[in-house]
Image (tube, helix red, strand yellow):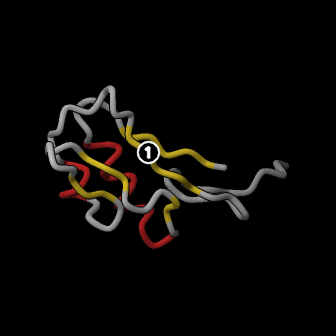
Amino acid sequence: MSTQPDVQPGRRSIGKVMRIRIDTDMCTGHGRCYVLAPDLFDTDDSGYGIVTKAEVPPELLDQAESARQNCPERAIFIDEE
């Protein structure tokens, strides 16, 4: 029997903090992140995505995951701390 908590993909483990980030070297400014997750991203003056809320609250995990999965350059990362 496993002692690991049953955590679904895209869901946080108990006591863990989820952080989202953009690799600015990889981003080419498609804008899908701020369209799909407007509560977490915005655009800078050049049209590139920027993170507005690095620590992802539980209610925004679906937005974060959608942005990550739909980034053409795979420049969005969700880290669990």
Residue in the picture at 60% in, 59% down: 12
Residue in the picture at 26% in, 29% down: 73
**Residue lying furthest top in this view?**
25
**x and y percent of residue 47 in the render?**
14, 45
**Residue lying furthest front in this view?**
45
**Amino acid beneath label 1:** Arg
Horizontally, is 31 left or right of 24 in the view?
A: left
Residue in the picture at 44% in, 40% down: 77
Crowding at dot 1, Cα within 10 Å, few <14 / some 14-19 / many 20+, comes out as many
Horizontally, is 61 left or right of 69 in the view?
A: right
Quadrant of residue 70 within the rendered picture: top left
Horizontally, is 73 left or right of 22 in the view?
A: left
Q: Which of the two residues, 72 or 11, is positioned nearer the viewer here?
A: 72
Q: How many marks?
A: 1
Pointer 1 residue? 21
**x and y percent of residue 59 in the render?**
45, 73
Quadrant of residue 18 within the rendered picture: bottom right
**x and y percent of residue 43 in the render?**
21, 53
Residue in the picture at 47% in, 57% down: 54
In the depicted structure, whether residue 80 falls above or below residue 62: above
Horizontally, is 11 left or right of 66 in the view?
A: right
Quadrant of residue 64 within the rendered picture: bottom left
In the depicted structure, whether residue 44 falls above or below residue 23: below
In the depicted structure, whether residue 73 falls above or below residue 35: above
For label 1, the SS is strand
**x and y percent of residue 52 in the render?**
37, 60
